[in-house]
Image (cartoon, rainbow, N blue to C red):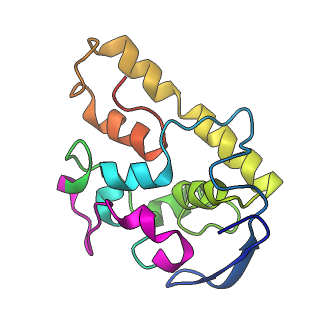
Amino acid sequence: MTVGDFIQVNDRMQTGYSYQLEAPMGEEFDPGFTPFHTPPEMLAMGVFEGKYLNDCRDEFPADWYEGAKLSDAPNPALNYFAIKSRQPLSVWREKGWIYGPDPRGWFQWYCRYFMGRRLPQTDTTQIKRWRGFARHAGQIRANCDVGDIFCRPRQRQALLQWAYDPLI
């Protein structure tokens, strides 16, 4: 996949959607957006109980899935911290947390952004949400001993699922 390519999306949640890659993969991010993990690293570390992007593999590079922890049904044991740490997509919809053309939410936006899609208004909103999530890292620093990676595992899993370093 290279700059200028069009990606056609046809999966269970989105059909007939396409976008053009406007930046090289993993490059040219907004200066205020500095994720700690790439999407393939997140999938390999165990996010969303293994139940994410499972039906849309054709949209993303095959190597993203080589070490991914995936499951046909949500399985908290696949999460890095082996703890339930996700809400159903229905909750995200009810709370109005789904923005732009990404019906699966923030992580789908991040995957597409990482690949090189740029949508200025949507990107600004999602980056602002990502920056706001940093408060969880502050809570871990304030309430956990350095090196105790099992202190506040739900918050740590959530940090991972938002591309922050959960091992702070």
- Relative to residue 87, is residue 120 drawn left or right? right
Where does the magenta region start and end?
56-77
- Relative to residue 135, is residue 2 drawn left or right? right
Q: Position of residue 15 (x, y in %)?
A: 62, 87
Identify the image quadrant of the N terminus: bottom right
Q: Residue at x 34, y 66 (%)?
A: 51
**Quarter assignment of residue 24:** bottom right
Q: Name above or below for residue 138 compared with residue 28.
A: above
Q: Name above or below for residue 120 compared with residue 154.
A: below
Q: In terms of depth relative to the viewer, which is nearer, 36 or 161?
A: 36
On the question of residue 19 being in view, the answer is: yes
Q: Position of residue 136 (x, y in %)?
A: 45, 28
- Relative to residue 52, is residue 22 drawn left or right? right
Q: Position of residue 70 (x, y in %)?
A: 29, 66
* The stretch drawn in magenta includes residue 142: no
* The stretch drawn in magenta includes residue 73: yes
Q: Residue at x 27, y 28 (%)?
A: 152
Q: Position of residue 97 (x, y in %)?
A: 59, 55
On the question of residue 47 being in view, the answer is: no
